[in-house]
Amino acid sequence: MQFRGGSSKGIYLLAHDLPQDEVLRNRLILDVVGRDTSQIDGLGGGVSLTSKVAIVTPSELEGVDVDYLFVQVVVGENRLDTKPNCGNILAGVGPFALEAGLVQATGDETRIVVRMLNSDKICELVLQTPGRKITYSGDAQIDGVNGTSAPITCFYTELAGAVTGALLPTGRAIDRVEGIELTCIDNGMPVVLIRATDLGISGYESPDMLDRNSDLKEKLESIRLQIGPKMNLGDVSGAVVPKMCIISAAKKGGLINTRTFIPHECHKSIGVLGAVSVATACLLPNSVARDIADLAEGNFQSVEHPAGEFSIRLEVDRSQVPIVVKSAGVLRTARLLSRGQLFVPLNTDQPY
């Protein structure tokens, strides 16, 4: 099936329909989504937001309904990356599990517990199932997506160090690379935060304008390659993490304004777990974001991005150092786009 999950789009597959051999599985996924930059011979859209795959299977872990492996097809590089999670594609895992018969609806609302295999973390999804049937119609609206849909609430727990092993992967709230201060954080997604003014820009430029700024992109990539190993990520030259997030003061009443590169193109909005990591960094006393951030009263924080804003509910224990985010709740939506039979190129030398 193909779903829009949050502000991304992806192909959702059952694990038992795929080859057990990982090499063959990955080859098949590349053929499904497309191998070249345009992905003209696959179902991808030629950009990272539409080159995503979810592999789903019933979970054997007690208290968990389904396991979910996220796969990012790296556009134009003919390879996959399974290091990061994707909270947008996760939003479609619940509906897919219902549509595929992996889980049965339990009432007007159905809770589905998902284990994210990329990080071995848990997320509980709350879906609208009136009459015990999944609905995609509703009045929930998320920036970056036209119209409204049924709300899907995602509750994340124990996200700190999901990919790198620590909330502050380098062990510090501030690092310096090429004379530029930055904060490296992993509260579900490894992110490097840099002040826009330190890069000689305002931070309010459009994604297209930033994508045309070759000097900026070269600087960001140089920093990313140097800081990646210090974040316990090893050589990140072929990885989509860490995400590079340029920050500036919010202009629309939010916590902070962002422009995120994933890794070499500016995101039209912001990823779910990326937004959680950014919001968490704003709470850290010594981070590059703290003096810029406009912290809201209570638990709700709003991260601004090119397409609007992203609201996050953070439950935080400030008595510990560094702070501990006990849970993060985000609102997403999803919609089933298509289901059917998928055709892949015939390969007689090494068939699937």
Image (spheres, rainbow, N blue to C red):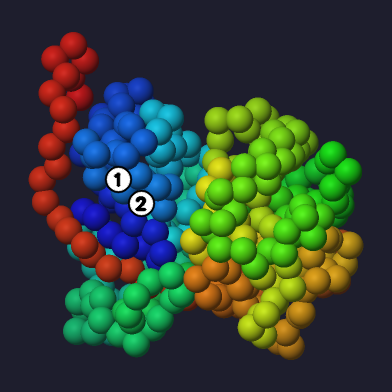
User: Could you tell me how many numbered marks the image carries?
Assistant: 2
User: Which residue is depicted at the point 55% across and 30% down?
Assistant: 238
Q: Residue 188 is drawn in which quadrant? A: bottom right
- Tell me, yes or no, if residue 298 can be seen here: yes
Is label 2 in a helix, a strand or a loop?
helix
Cβ atoms at labels 2 and 1 below 8 Å apart: yes
Earlier along the polypeptide chain: callout 2 or callout 1? 1
Residue 33: x and y in percent read 29, 40
Image quadrant for the N terminus? Answer: bottom left
Q: Residues within 10 Å of mark 2 (few under 14, many from 20)?
A: many
Which amino acid lies under the numbered mark 1 shown in the image of this protein? Gly
Q: Which residue is mark 1?
A: 44
Is label 1 in a helix, a strand or a loop?
loop
- Residue 150 located left or right of residue 246: left
- Residue 1 located left or right of residue 58: left
Is the residue 104 above or below the residue 82 in the image?
A: below
User: Which residue is depicted at the point 43% across and 30% down?
Assistant: 77
Is the residue 194 above or below the residue 143 in the image?
A: above
Q: Nearer the viewer, residue 171 or 347?
A: 347
User: Which residue is depicted at the point 72% across and 84% down?
Assistant: 296
User: Which residue is depicted at the point 73% across and 59% down?
Assistant: 201
Residue 349: x and y in percent read 18, 11
Q: Residue 23 is drawn in which quadrant? A: top left
Q: CA distance from mark 2 to mark 1?
A: 6 Å
Label disc, if present, on residue 50 of the rendered structure:
2
Is the residue 221 above or below the residue 247 in the image?
A: above
Which amino acid lies under the numbered mark 2 shown in the image of this protein? Thr
Residue 102: x and y in percent read 25, 57
